[in-house]
Image (spheres, rainbow, N blue to C red):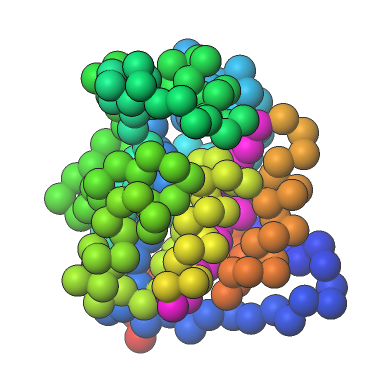
Amino acid sequence: MTYTYKQDFIPQNKVEINLPTTAVFITDPQNDFLSEGGAAWALVGENVEKDKVVDHQVALKEIAKKVGIPVFYSPHTYTDKEYANWKVLSPIDKIMFSIDMFHEGKWGHEFHPKMTPDENTHVLNPHKGLSNFQSGDAVLQLRQHNIKTIILAGMSANLCLEAHLRDAVENGFEVVVVSDATAGGGPFSKDAALTNFEFIASEVTTTDDIVNRLKQAARN
C-alpha cells in the first residue's frame, strides 16, 4: 500500500534512507489516545481502529529494532499541580483538562501495552504543549544520537503530530510522515493534517512502504 498525494501540484519527494542517521519518532503512544477506555477514546477511537493505528505503530517500532535504528517516544504529561494551577488554556487544552487526559500517575497516562518501551526506545522528557521541540528535549536527544531523518508517527494527526513535524523541519530535520500511523478526533482532523503534511514534510508515505524501504536499506 502506498500513499497518494491529494494535491497534485506539490512536488513529491522520496527520501533516501540512511540507517545510521535515521530514527522512528512516535508522539503520545499512550492509553488515553490508543486504548479503549482512554480519556480521548470517544473522540479518536473510531479513527484509531479504522486506520489500524496501533498495529502500524507496533510495526514501525519492530522494524526499527530489527534494522538497528532507534525509536524515540514523545509522551504528553500533566501533573497534579498543573491541573490545579494552569489558567491559560487553548481550546484543546480545555478539552484535555475536562476529560482528565495525560494525568501523571493514572492509567491513561501510561504507554499502550503494545507500545511499552524496550531497550531500543528512548523516552523523551514529556511535552506540555503540542510539541516536544518547544517544551521537551527532542532536539538535544536527536542531535546527541546524530539523527538527521525522522520517520514520524503518533497522535494526534492535526495537533501534536503536526506540531512536531513543523518544529522538526524548523530545526533542520528531514521528516517522513507515516500517514496511516496517526489519527485525529472527529471527521475533519485527519484530512486537515494530511493537507499540511503534504506541504511541510519531506515525504508522506505509509507503514507498508517505509517498512519495506527500511528492510531494503538494511540489505544494502
Kindly give the residue lying farthest to the right in the view shown: 8
Q: Viewed as shown, does residue 4 lie left or right of 183?
A: right
> Farthest left residue?
119
- In depth, the one of 193 and 55 nearer the eye is 193
> Which image quadrant for residue 32?
top left
Check the image and report above or below for 127 versus 64.
Answer: above
Q: In this rendering, does residue 87 appear at all?
A: yes
- Asked whether residue 176 is drawn in magenta, I would say yes
160 left or right, relative to 192: left
Tell me where residue 128 sits by quadrant: top left
Where is residue 96 drawn, in percent x and y?
A: 51, 24
Magenta highlight: main SS:
loop
Q: Position of residue 131 (x, y in %)?
A: 44, 51
Q: Where are the magenta residues, as a range?
A: 172-185
Q: Residue at x 61, y 18 (%)?
A: 42
- In this rendering, is residue 211 above or below 26? below
Whether residue 26 is visible to the viewer of this picture, yes or no, is no
- Left or right position of 113 against 202: left
Nearest the viewer among 166 and 34 is: 166
